[in-house]
Amino acid sequence: MTFKERLRGLIIDALGKPILWLWTKSCRLTIVGESEYRALRDTGRPVVHLIWHGKIFIVPYFFRKRNIMPLVSPSRDGEIAARIMDGWGYKLLRGSGTHFMKNAWLDMKKELQGGGEVIIVPDGPRGPDRKLKMGGIKLAAETGAALVPFSFSTSKKKILHSWDRFLIFTPFSRIVAVYGRPIEIPQGLNAEGMESERRRVERLMIDFDEETDRFFDKEN
């Protein structure tokens, strides 16, 4: 690790959490669609949260102190997220679809089989944007977990010029954090059936995310 990388890490460690906390606390947050997710958790049902890479800005703050297991990629963006999440009540797990992650996969299965929750970014860490990879589908099929889409939107959008159209909210804006309807994946599917479910969930995720993006348009 170079001196520049070490310095960057120290800055993120010292300032990342307080800045994101203050940034988000300055906003007015509304939560939508939480009841079905809560009903799942009240019965002890394991949950896989699916969140597009472009919508992860709010994730470290929103899901903090819940003992959830997020799968965080070893990429530079993932390193920032991991440093902010560290010490904020997460079971951090490092790995991605482009890195060897046999142990991470087993850890996620164990967590879900024990009735826990994991967070997966199904188009990360390098895309293509909103192209759902198979991992979450396989996890749900093998553990009986429910898939729960999550997204957010804001009254004052700032979309970065990045592959994932990364969305951030400005301080003192309004934010809506939205849980999607739980998605069930049948067990015992063959390869063709799994691919069919992958396409179905991808379409549901895209439609859900677009609907979330339009939340504040109703006011205009």
Image (spheres, rainbow, N blue to C red):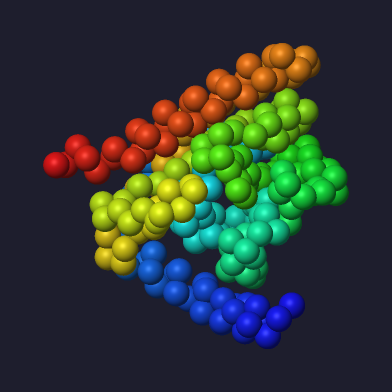
Q: Position of residue 97 (x, y in %)?
A: 72, 44
Q: Position of residue 63 (x, y in %)?
A: 54, 54
Q: Nearer the viewer, residue 194 or 75?
A: 75
Q: Nearer the viewer, residue 166 or 154?
A: 166
Q: Could you tell me which residue is drawn at 51 percent across and 79 percent down? A: 15
Q: Quadrant of residue 87?
A: bottom right
Q: Position of residue 9 (x, y in %)?
A: 63, 77
Q: Is residue 96 left or right of residue 77?
A: right
Q: Quadrant of residue 216?
A: top left
Q: Could you tell me which residue is drawn at 50 percent across and 52 percent down? A: 56
Q: Could you tell me which residue is drawn at 14 percent across and 42 percent down? A: 220
Q: Is residue 10 left or right of residue 218?
A: right
Q: Position of residue 43 (x, y in %)?
A: 63, 34
Can residue 62 be seen by looking at this rendering?
A: no
Whether 196 is drawn above or below 43: the answer is above
Q: Could you tell me which residue is drawn at 71 percent across and 81 percent down? A: 2
Can residue 46 be seen by looking at this rendering?
A: yes
Q: Nearer the viewer, residue 181 or 94?
A: 94
Q: Nearer the viewer, residue 211 or 166?
A: 166
**Tag count:** 0
